[in-house]
Amino acid sequence: MKESKSISEQHVCDVLIIGAGAAGLSLALKLAPHAKVNVLSKGKLSEGSTFYAQGGVAAVFSDTDSVDSHVEDTLIAGAGLCDEEAVRFAVSNGKESMQWLIDTGVNFDTEIDEQGNTQYHLTREGGHSHRRILHAADATGSEIENSLLSAVRKHQNITLMEGYNAVDLITSRKLNLPANRVLGAYVWNRKKERVETIKAHFVSLATGGASKVYQYTSNPDVSSGDGIALAWRSGCRIANMEFNQFHPTCLYHAEARNFLLTEALRGEGAHLLRPDGTRFMPDFDERAELAPRDIVARAIDYEMKRLGADCMYLDISHKSKDFIVKHFPTIYRRCLLLGIDIAHQPIPIVPAAHYSCGGVMIDHHGQTDIDGLYAIGEVSYTGLHGANRLASNSLLECVVYAHASAKDIINRLPFYKERKFADIPDWDDSQVEDSDEEVVIQHNWHELRLFMWDYVGIVRTDKRLERALRRVQMLQQEINEYYSHFKVGNNLLELRNLVQVAEIIIKSAMERKESRGLHYNLDYPEQLDNPQPTILSKRD
């Protein structure tokens, strides 16, 4: 932390939410009747992972389904590492949370049943034993994000701060005050190119995941692990970061490197094919294309390496064009623009980094190790996902834990509203200068993402992990030196965070001496009898 000799703009609020996806906006809406809320978005408000989510949200809405069945499916997908209490908490609150989304304005697809009644159309995805995925065609995320944003903009108590990067959290420990409580954050105003201060009684991290650490990812550019790095630098424990989910089916095309092909395609009968047109998933798992994502991604990776092929193929052309256009309009239009008619030909696909199953450790209220600091959504580790996330449980987790956090904050808020904010020094950049070597950041950025893909990807070995650790520690030294001498900016802040998260991923992977779920190490192909979460602490 840098002591300031100058005065910069300071903002004050009851609750600061860093991130404007489904988790952050849901929390803001729940808090708005009770608190002044600032919501931070480093890019456009619609640029987070929520907006690009296609498949849907898993929740028990059918009379033929049950909470117990959803819990069992989640535990099976999690490969023995789920916290069953956390799973049951999320699943049991699923229907109520989805009803809240519906009441807020989210329009999930409906259909007319045989009796002429309107009901929600539920689709099925890999790992699910029932149809339980609420969706809005194949653009569920944008429907949720736009509906929540529309509701948020109606609240006078919510201030949207677009174009701000969180630089670091401000805690009492950093200011040499008693205990360790969060007091606010330093933030980078991208328009004015300066660091500002936000004082808050409570802070919630809702920054999403860290898949941008890999060369190939389905995530938008903003997924740079910011919240995980912020929490780590402030002293929070991080768990299970070795389990990074690689989505099996991303479009393989030079003009669409991060376009996801939803799990629902396979749920509705799409087949995975080799270049010669033969299916291969039945050779790997009796569930074939409906096996959990880790199994499907490894099978695709294996076939690509075995055949020396650039990609595999996903084929739903055996379905009628009307069916395809109705259920997958976004995918149909996007592929058609790229010269691929999915109603008549298979789609070239490759796996890509998609979701971080680990993150900042929290309790059922979303509370981290630091008093007043919460974490919700993909940035957090709740125990719901274990060693592999069940499809469409992510948006469920966002809303359930946003509601749980809101309830806890509202209960605690009256006590803190009566207290004064701490005296926080302004950010001081008087001893640093503008960068004249931006190429250094770009070079380090590309190097990091490439060796993470090569050494810490779908299949790992001890030697690969050791190489990755050496490289990431060298990069850390270079970036820390750079950070000490030059003014901050978006690229530097994101790279600083990505390198920190990369080290956590690598060290987590080195700790796990087995292959389980999304972590597959050729040196330890078997599973341990009593698996435990991998928990890293900065103090350790």
Image (tube, grey):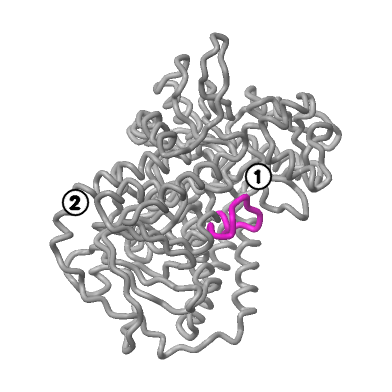
Establish if 96 lies above or below 210. Answer: above
Q: Amino acid type of disc 2?
A: Arg
Q: Is residue 463 visible?
A: no
Q: Is label 1 in contact with label 2 (beta carbons under 8 Å)?
A: no
Residue placed under numbered mark 1 in the picture:
260
Query: In the rendered structure, which segment of residues is drawn in magenta?
Result: 211-223
Establish if 99 lies above or below 336. Answer: above
Q: Is residue 465 visible?
A: yes
Q: Determine whether, in the image, residue 75 is placed left or right of residue 364.
A: right
Q: Amino acid type of disc 1?
A: Leu
Secondary element type, mark 1: loop
Mark nearer the N terminus (1 vs 2) = 1
| Disc assigned to residue 412 | 2
**Closer-to-camera residue (176/41):** 41
| Disc assigned to residue 325 | none
Badge 2: how crowded within 10 Å, few (<14), some, or many (20+)?
some
Magenta stretch encompasses residue 222: yes
